[in-house]
Amino acid sequence: AKFHGFELRSETGAAPQGVRRRDAVLRVAGSDLGLPHSSLHYQIKPTCYQTMLARLALLPALAAAACAGKQVRVGTFGDTNPEALVVMSDWLNTNKVANECWTFYRQPSGGLSIAKLDSGDLDMALLGSTPYAAAAARRGRLKAVSVAHLKGSSQALVTRARFNEPKDLAPNGTAKATIATPRTSTTHYIALAVIANARMDLTDVNLVFMSPNEIMAAWDAGTIDGACAWGTAMQHMLNNPWGGSAAADDKGRQMVSASTVAEWDYRTGNVVAASDDFIANHADLVEYLVAAFERTRHDYRINSLTSDKWADDSDYNEVVARFATLSDTPTSQEKTDTYELLARFEYLSVEDQLKADKIDLPKMTQDSAYFFYEQKVLAEDPSGADQVSHYENYYDKTILTGLTTSDYEPLLATDTAFSATNEADVQREVASDPTCADPTGAAATAVTVTTTGTTFEDGSTGTNAYANDTDCRWQFTPPGGNYVSLDIAKLMSEQPDDGLEIYDKDGDLLAAFTGRWDPNDLPDIRSSDEATVKWTTNSYDENAIGYLEDVGFQATSSSTVSAPSNCSPGESGASCEYAYCLGVVDEASATLANTIRSQAAGTSAYAPNSRCGWRITSTTAHVELKFTELAIENGFDFVKIYEGATAPTGFSLTAPAAEPKLLYAATGSTLPPKLVFAAPVFVTFESDGLGNTAVGATGDGGFAIEHKVAAKPADCAGDWTSPVANCALDHCTGDAVRAGVHSHGSFSSSSGKSAADATDYLAKTTCRWFFEVPDGGLAGLSFRAPVWDVEASGTLTSTTDAVEIYQQGDDGAPSGDAVATLKGGDDPADWDFDFSATSGKFVAVFASDLNNPVPKKGFDLVYAGKYGSADAGANGGFCLCDFGGNCAWPCDEEAPACGGTCHVPTSKDEAEIDLGLLYGLVFGLFVPLLCVIGLAFARYRRKIQGKLKGERAELKKFKDSIVGMRVVTKAVAPAALPPPPGTARWYWQESAPRLHTHANLKPPHWVPYDASTSAALEESFQKGWETILIGTAPRQYKIYPRRMKQVNEATGFERELLREATAARQAADVESGAPRPPDVDPDEPCMVLRVGSIVQIARQREDGWAFGSLTMEAPVTQPGL
């Protein structure tokens, strides 16, 4: 074919009918001339070499042509897996099903991949099993179609060598360790599993979220102490010392691997997933990719054991190394690392992927989802038998069952269509591309628009990657009285961070777009007088491989006299062509209700990555908001209502000087009551990229709110200002302020009633109470809780639910560290906090996390300032707390008057008692009466005094006789005598997924020790030893015979033990209970203590046991023995 005077032919000899794709590489004498290219290489046969070069210099930069068929986008990681051969050799683009185009985008984490699958930015993706579990729990529109691998030892918690076990990461005289991991990844799951298994919680470790590249940089900088990572990031930490330190204890060390975590029942792996739409419409392409991936894994399973095809110096290994490192020439060390990392994974055959006894993916998914639920990563409970079918349906086995052995068993070397030396193109940023920043250094490029229009773009040329870490702005101004019209012709970016934002002349957000878009789906945006466009990107590059698409953005600005249309609720765009909300809209409330919506009526789901705002004004002092629809994803998508007309951060070009006060937040699908607020208010709606409806909701997702003017409601907030003027809520929300200075007061997680009447406090709610106590002599604060039912961290759950007390800063906001923290599980009687106060102004903050696995009522709290004895009365110290007798702050003896007031808060609205009136009653009525009673009592006392004198000797004898007597309040008894050594059998508890590996199992899960180990354990038990070591490193265990625990010395993982002994002779008065001290004679009789019995102690031992006699035995009617 002739093209600009050149004759083109393919390297294979088949002459192309034309240059169908404008990104074809032009090679002269084997050299790449630097033009955009794809994997199809063409040779140029010049009719005149000099003429060719001259003409080539005049050619414009070539942009990527649209794919002639289906554009297939696949998400991958930088893992060293066999399927990298498919990607880096461009196998699918050189051997197509039809005329489709394959592009592989490298993802920073599976948490982002599931959002891209759900929103359509990706068609298929490799996902970690835990991001996939999160997607299934959140009802993402995708399915798993195969199991790529199990993690084995390919992922691990790597730390500085100074940390020997997980518990060393918690503070013990030093600062707690900082551990990084990509959010919602399989390594995030591993991190949480390690924390939970070590009996720690998230307050013990500083867990931060980073991409793999950020982890490597942070490790080198010494800003993290370790990370749960995989692939090159994990290997980098193992190969390079922390912070460049030369100390031996700063080398990277693998503390816990994925295979160890799997032994704890936390199994992880990777799946291949596809969007529901892609499975429905392109099942043939799904099968094509799965079959290609399976061929490479089958080849690795066979050839890695029987040939050198996958040796560290082989072509196959080098291709995988190029994929993992994105280097054209991997180093010898990188190839060695690749070889070792490949072997760390467990690759399942197609047959094994279909067998539940090999990999029960639905159960593994549901278990992972529930663990994430416990660890506050998911809001909705994924457990229960009623949800089993849901997780089973998320594993679509149709593709695997449709494959035949001929699809995946032929070895790669036998396929002439496969070439490991073929090189796919990689999309990279090119330094010579122009920048989009203003050349003068101004904050924004100023452009006066015309009717003909001005084109602007990100700066990348052809198929080069757009620049990272950019913040480019254009300010467009039309002729007087005209409008700026913006038409986005191209937007291909990585959601959620890279994208376009458009603002009006006042700085209000008009629209925000992120991700990969069909330009036909993007609305035109129109603004009066002025518009500012902002293009921002983060530091990550997806580095597309294969068929390279034209990425970045391109748009045109022009001037028009046509005003934008007045759109119906939920519609936007210059002509209302977009069926979803966009940007900030001004709304005026009237007598008749107006409506705001997340999407147009009848649209089934709201848009991913929505960012919408409504500034609602009113002709009256108050405005009423009524939710008529609410079905948004619980804990991830929110409607928030702010005080005033100021737009919060994210909704204005410049951040506000002070963030507006949050009044109320709604998520999930429970409709709140009618709410009345002081006008104006600012309403926002934000969604992420996944799950754009409420779990379990029937009908359309989204929300709708009717708003109208409202009269001033009746005051029902007492001495606290309420964010909701009509006090319609039964739970706290936003900021409440108590005016004035008060030595004591109370507040509650419930609104208008006690928490005792609540069912479960709301998730993802933040409430703040601003109060002031006298600061003269202030030495701290005291709290008591008539009701305290707040979630506490448990063995496998970590919660951040707590009430934290801060001092107010100069701006009134919380300042510095918390001076007091009240957590679930704490004893309210212990809440007395001493500190040096800078003032008497404080803020109490209650922030709940994503869920309460068990319903919690919340709390009622009473507070008071703590003062020295000389100041207690003068400052009105708290006198009495009469909430059912659960708490009391008595006045100091030196100041019994308590400053003239005594507060008895039996209810929230009860007034203080007037002590002046009380004193009048006491001295005018009761004192004379007491005098009369005193005289009568004096005569009576003299009469009986003689009788008492004669009985004192008898009383003394009785007192002596009852010294040492005790009443039994808890039923206890020593255990039976143990059998002779060697007659007991010992067992350890196995994890459920590995029970099938043991032949001699004692139901339900006990595995016997061998005879010699069992005898050694029994000997240690009989002799009362605290611990005994068994096994050899790296599988060495510390046994605690009395505690019945086995602890892995390397990982700290604990297992339960079982001791099965033969029956022993029992003393007549001995029942099963606590073991008797080993130094007590076996023939010594022991008492069985029943509740109500009386015993007399003859001699007390230091270990808590005693010798004595039974004085009176209670009837055997008490439970508990």
Image (spheres, helix red, strand yellow):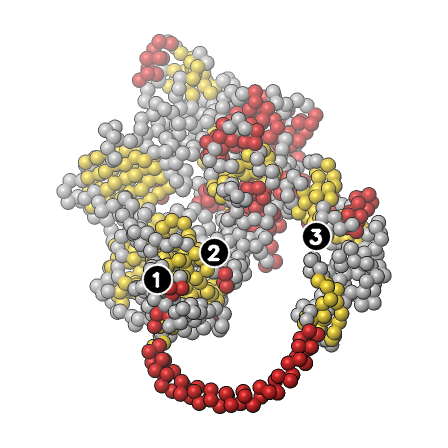
* Front disc: 2 or 3: 3
- Residue 376 percent location from the top left of the image: 51, 52
The front one of 498 and 126 is: 498
The residue that appears at 46% across and 27% down in the rendered structure is: 426
Taking 1041 as reference, is 91 left or right?
Answer: left
Taking 60 as reference, is 424 left or right?
Answer: right
The disc placed on residue 801 is 2
Number of residues whose C-alpha sits closer than 10 Å to that of mark 2, classed few (under 14), some (14–19) or many (20 or more)? many
Q: Quadrant of residue 1100?
A: bottom right
- Residue 681 percent location from the top left of the image: 29, 58
**Amino acid type indicated by mark 3:** Arg
**Amino acid type indicated by mark 1:** Val
Marks 2/1: CA distance?
A: 25 Å
**Amino acid type indicated by mark 2:** Asp
Number of residues whose C-alpha sits closer than 10 Å to that of mark 1, classed few (under 14), some (14–19) or many (20 or more)? many
Q: Quadrant of residue 780?
A: bottom left
Marks 3/1: CA distance?
A: 49 Å
Q: Earlier in the sequence, mark 2 or mark 3?
A: 2
Compared with residue 365, is residue 940 higher up or lower down, i.e. above or below?
below
Q: Earlier in the sequence, mark 2 or mark 1?
A: 1
Compared with residue 847, is residue 418 higher up or lower down, i.e. above or below?
above
* Front disc: 2 or 1: 1
The residue that appears at 72% across and 52% down in the rendered structure is: 1042
Count of marks, rendered view:
3
**Mark 1 sits on what residue?**
773
Callouts 2 and 1 close, C-beta under 8 Å: no
The disc placed on residue 1043 is 3
Compared with residue 310, is residue 937 higher up or lower down, i.e. above or below?
below
Where the C terminus falls, by quadrant?
A: bottom right
The residue that appears at 40% across and 72% down in the rendered structure is: 896
The front one of 203 and 437 is: 203
